[in-house]
Image (cartoon, rainbow, N blue to C red):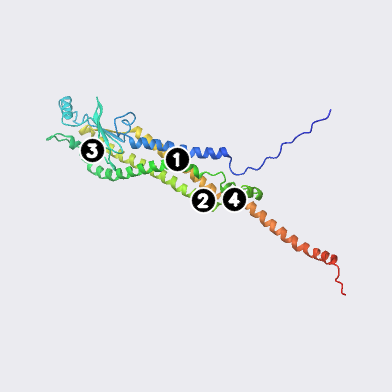
């Protein structure tokens, strides 16, 4: 019985550039990072804007004035009731655009109108709500804290809004930074490079990779700096109010949900920047071995062709001279 011929596996073709699935996953990953960061930045921006689910529980700082009269005072329960009747609310919540106020048993009863470059001034708010003739003591060092808060709030507002807009834009632009033919995928085989040319390294880095690196850096920088400013500023606010708690019974605490939202957004923007930084470094410095091999092969090919032509040319001339018939004269 005749044996069937054995078929050997054909040699694998050299991988040219990046696979389509790898490019797709890179693009999806970058868009996903910016999409998640943008969602949490939106939650930061709309926090405490209105009395709605999730929004009402998202704030930078909450100040509780329900027990602002010292408990050491006789008939403290009666005085607390009088304190509420003179116009004060039990708590105040601070957001990016405005503040909300309310009572412990009722929840939020009023939110101020959103304002561009808003900054929280508790002294002005409390004094404006007191009835005529009523006075109240506030921490002595609140004035110096308000000067810092005004400048920091303006920077925080601008940075958060800019980071939100830039992050939204990068959701759609960041996939364009990923290419299936980046410079680092150059092959040591000239035939492969000629059939599937890669992007020129200098052009790709200067006109594509580096501009996206700047955009991702700005998005990460604005988000992280805004988060740092907000965290530091409202921690100072909290410490100022709670430092006088023994005399005034003012309670203040940081909004955990707001802090988690803005730092998650900062983390995802930072991860996206690190991805783009690695891609930029790879496109700039990758593929060195293949380039050296190409230069070495081209140099060897030039020297061999030059040496061969110089050594063979005398023999060829002699043979051609022998084959050429002598000229006849009539």
Which mark, residue 205?
A: 2
Q: Secondary structure at mark 3?
A: helix
Residue mark closest to the camera, 3 vs 1: 1
> For the residues marked 4 and 1, what is the alpha-carbon distance in whole angstroms?
32 Å
Q: Quadrant of the N terminus?
A: top right
Q: Is residue 82 left or right of residue 11?
A: left
> For the residues marked 2 and 4, what is the alpha-carbon distance in whole angstroms?
15 Å
Q: Are marks 2 and 4 in contact (CB under 8 Å)?
A: no
Q: Is residue 316 above or below residue 202?
A: below
- Assess disc 3: are there few (<14), some (14-19) or many (≥20) residues with their C-alpha within 10 Å of its C-alpha: some
Please state the horizontal and vertical placement of residue 190, each as a whole percent of the image: 65, 50
- Assess disc 4: are there few (<14), some (14-19) or many (≥20) residues with their C-alpha within 10 Å of its C-alpha: few
Which mark, residue 171?
A: 1
- Assess disc 2: are there few (<14), some (14-19) or many (≥20) residues with their C-alpha within 10 Å of its C-alpha: many
Q: Which residue is mark 3?
A: 122
Q: Secondary structure at mark 1?
A: helix
Corner quadrant of residue 252: top left
Mark toward the start of the polypeptide (4 vs 1) = 1
Which mark, residue 288?
A: 4
Residue mark closest to the camera, 2 vs 4: 2
Q: Residue at x 40, y 35 (%)?
A: 39
């Amino acid at each position: 019985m005749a044996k069937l011929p054995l078929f050997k596996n054909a040699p694998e073709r050299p991988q040219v550039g990046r696979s389509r699935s790898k490019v797709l996953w890179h693009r999806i990953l970058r868009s996903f990072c910016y999409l998640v960061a943008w969602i949490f930045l939106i939650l930061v921006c709309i926090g405490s804007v209105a009395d709605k689910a999730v929004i009402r529980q998202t704030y930078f700082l909450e100040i509780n004035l329900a027990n602002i009269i010292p408990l050491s005072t006789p008939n403290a329960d009666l005085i607390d009731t009088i304190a509420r009747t003179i116009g004060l609310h039990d708590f105040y919540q601070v957001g990016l655009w405005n503040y909300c106020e309310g009572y412990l048993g009722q929840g939020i009863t009023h939110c101020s109108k959103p304002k561009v470059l808003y900054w929280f001034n508790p002294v002005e708010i409390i004094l404006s709500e007191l009835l005529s003739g009523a006075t109240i003591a506030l921490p002595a060092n609140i004035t110096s804290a308000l000067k810092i808060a005004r400048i920091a709030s303006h920077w925080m507002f601008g940075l958060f809004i800019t980071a939100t807009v830039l992050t939204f834009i990068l959701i759609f632009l960041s996939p364009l930074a990923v290419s299936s033919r980046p410079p680092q995928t150059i092959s040591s085989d000239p035939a492969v490079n000629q059939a599937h040319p890669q992007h020129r390294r200098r052009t790709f880095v200067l006109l594509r990779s580096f501009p996206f690196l700047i955009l991702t850096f700005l998005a990460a920088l604005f988000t992280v700096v805004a988060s740092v400013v907000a965290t530091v500023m409202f921690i100072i606010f909290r410490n100022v109010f709670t430092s006088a708690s023994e005399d005034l019974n003012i309670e203040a605490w940081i909004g955990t949900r707001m802090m988690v939202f803005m730092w998650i957004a900062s983390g995802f923007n930072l991860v996206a920047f690190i991805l783009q930084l690695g891609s930029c470094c790879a496109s700039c410095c990758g593929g060195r071995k293949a380039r050296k091999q190409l230069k070495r092969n081209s140099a060897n090919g030039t020297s061999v062709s030059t040496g061969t032509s110089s050594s063979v040319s005398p023999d060829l001339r002699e043979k051609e001279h022998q084959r050429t018939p002598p000229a006849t004269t009539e």
